[in-house]
Image (spheres, rainbow, N blue to C red):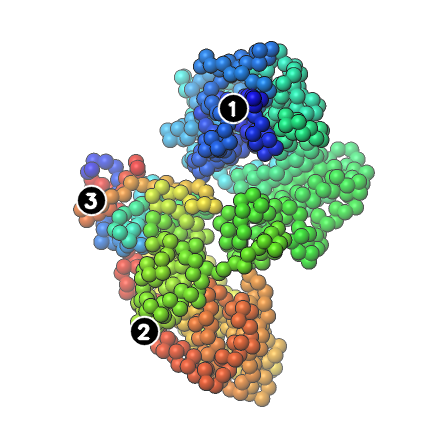
Amino acid sequence: MKRKILVVGNGMAGVRCVEEILRLEPDAFDITIVGAEPHPNYNRILLSKVLGGEGGLEDIILNPYSWYEEHGVALYTGAEVTGLDLEARTASLDNGQELGFDELILATGSLPVMLPLPGVEKEGVIAFRDVKDCEAMREAARRYQHAVVIGGGLLGLEAARGLLNLGMQARVVHVLDCLMERQLDPFASKLLQQDLERQGMLFTMEAQSERILGEDRVQALQLKDGRVLAADLLVMAVGIKPNVALAKAAGLEIKRGIVCDDFMRASKPHVWAVGECAEHRGLVYGLVAPLYEQGLVLARSLCGAEGEAYTGSTIHTKLKVSGVDVFSAGEFNEVGETKAYRFRDDFSGVYKKVLAREGRVVGGVLYGDTSDSQKILQLMREPDGEARLSALFGAASKEVKEAAGVEAMAPADIVCSCNGVSKQSILDAIKTKGCSSVDQIKACTNAARSCGGCKPLVQDLLKMAMGPDLAEEKEHICDCTELSRDEVVAEIKAKSLSTGKEVRMVLGWKNEEGCSKCRPAVNYYLNMLFPDRHADEVSSRFVNERLHANIQKDGTFSVVPRIRGGVTNPAELRRIADAAEKFNVPMVKITGGQRIDLLGVKKEDLPAIWAELDMPSGYAYAKALRTVKTCVGSEFCRYGVGDSTSLGIALEKKFEMLNTPAKVKMAVSGCPRNCAECAIKDVGVVAVDGGQWDVFTGGNGGVSLKGAELLARVDSAEEVIALTAAYLQHYRETANWNERTAPWQERLGLEAIKAVVLDPTRAPGLVERMEATLATYKDPWAAAAKDAGLWKDSAAKALPVGQA
Amino acid sequence: MESAPGLKVPLEGLIPQQGRRVASPWGEVAVFLLSNGEPRALLNRCPHKGGTLAEGIVCGEYVFCTQHDWKICLKDGKAAPPDSGSTPVFKAGIVGQHVVIQKEG
């Protein structure tokens, strides 16, 4: 017969312990879990997400009901164990049921501390501990305005942040002058307070609560100094205490928590405790990592695999408070002989402090950037940690890391800086979630999803983790289809597909209407293949290419008129200045491409500001030729050997409005000093004394630095233009949508590209197709301004129902 | 219908698969017609960083945010995994020549 395990408590510690047992001995036990909350095990740490409406309970469930079923774990939810008979080995439930057990695991967690203030029983006075409390807060937010949270610790701040998200005014009342004093030093604490104040949180510091005022429902909190703070909702988040009532009644030894030995055994045989209710070597832990360590030790003991004893956990905290990364470990306040090493960057809001004593690192605080947390923990374990501290406070550590590649990175080091994804999270995704391609890792962790600059690192991690098991990745254009770009283009040609809808239907797309990747891509391929036949599919264009302006973070747009070669005149400048004034443009900026950017223009003002400017669109928003940057050149410069401005203007005039797979930037320099920075452009042209020009291609100065390579030296400006036409058309016809010339040129190889665009039998065809495409373009601003359909927003004024 | 609180947006201003921004007492609302002509409405604020959704690319029942390409479901306002969070949706229906939008869904 299987031994029966009864777990009292369906929270993170108890269920994790059960998971460990199942991993060690999947079939040895009959396991029953009793939990007081009417839910399966959820991630209590993420409750603030549910509170703030960032997700529902289902988003933070760790073990869904199906998990219990699959593993044969009997689950009683919404049930309370009211009594234990440790002699008879039975537990009685509040519904009268009796459960027998051979081994009993107490994982009853903790209870919120409620300050015994007069009025604490009033309606609207709650704790922040479980789903029920979240629901009470959400309900209050619908009807009331003022929330007061007592307690400036992590829990209190999370509650206040959630209440802010719900639209309430949230004030935190804290008894000390520093927030989160158990995790932060005073300086970091002040930084946090400032950050939170910027988010709209209010603080009353060094304030002692006296009484709760109101009739049936709370109306205000009165402080000892007499001040009265309005409160329709009062959340107490002053701390937690181990939930030991049941254990105490059963006669187990209790001090602060249920006293346990190094194997998590309580004071009587066959009884164990784990998590926030357990006391080990005089300490009660409230953080997840120690609870999980305890769970593992307990599981091993129960399965007879008693290994290393639990000797306690190094306390360190790494968390996100309202979007701010915070870490602390060991000692973080200077006393006596401790030496403090500090680093501050007020512009990026980063603060680091490490404390050392007698050559040892004894603790530290990180604020705003916690990527060094693993290094600090490592240094704390080493006897001469202080000597190696320099690695933390210089750029040196970063360089070493990059030079040594992914193997040398610490688990907590950030691989994807856009989305804050660590090496460890990526390895976890590979190992535990079965990810075997960059795309799957992207979908699972968000790594490489934004700028894509870390994609090679992710690829390296995959290789490192999977070794020879790593399958060749087949490139497909998006998750809607298994087909690659070349296959899609070939099918379009072979089957004469004429619209995006047809492509998706005939080629068996998984999503009938595609996604934000394939829709613009297919539209581009159709436009490229059939410049005179395919009607551009506006609804498949990104907003910028639909409204011919660049959307900004606040939903306004930027307007960049065409200034060919960066050469303008007083009349144009006057019109730009007048337009900027007339439309109250918040920022006028010179761009990196030698143009003028008018930022912060409202959508409905776009047609009018274009008319006012009376200049063509600069295409600063499109996958198209952006601009041709030039230096002064032989017309004025004493070093100039070629007329770079004239050639730049001619190139821009020739290729402006040309749609390309990704943006294309060009430059022309009048001498090899190369002031126009041709080496990092898609096409860069440099004058050579004697009337010749060198044409460089495939450079990039953005996400991934790449020097342009010499395509050819030609004898005249006309030849530069013809060669550029052939090169760009070859790029248009063979590149993946959204692939810049740099990776394209690397993929095909410079020699292979030369073999096409310098081939006198093939180049003329490319140039001819380019000419046919260019002939279809018209300045979009003039046309779009007349297209009322684009600007209906302002017309789509809503009328309140009933007043129509 | 006439007495319930809500907004009326003229149908003639709407183009399938292209959102529109409409001011409302509940904040700016993004109104859409799907390719099948069904109306949808949600708060014009991506749960990620508050980006405008009205100008996003519409694919079936989803809109892709203009800012960082989050995929938001137009039925329930939820962000598709691996992202999480949601934006409030409103009840939207066609009544005569208008899309009527109501807060209670």
Secondary structure category for the residue under label 3: strand
Q: Which residue is mark 3?
A: B95
Residue found 48% across the figure and 76% down from its top:
A727
Residue occupying the point 55% across, 63% down = A702
Image coordinates of residue A752 in percent, x first then y, are 53, 76
In front: label 1 or label 2: 1
> Which marked residue is nearer to the observer: mark 3 or mark 1?
1
C-alpha separation, residue under disc 2 versus residue under disc 3: 41 Å
Residue A523 against residue B70 in the figure, above or below: below
Give the residue number, with chain letter if any, for mark 2: A532
Label 3 marks which chain's residue? B
Residue beneath disc 1: A33
Residue type at mark 1 is Ile
| Residue at the farthest bottom position | A690
Disc on the earlier residue, 1 or 2: 1
Q: Which amino acid does the dot numbered 3 rest on?
A: Val
Residue at 27% across, 43% down: B92
Q: Is residue A546 left or right of residue A31?
A: left
Pair 2/3: label in front: 2
Q: Quadrant of residue A598?
A: bottom left
Q: Chain of mark 1?
A: A
Say if labels 2 and 3 share a chain: no
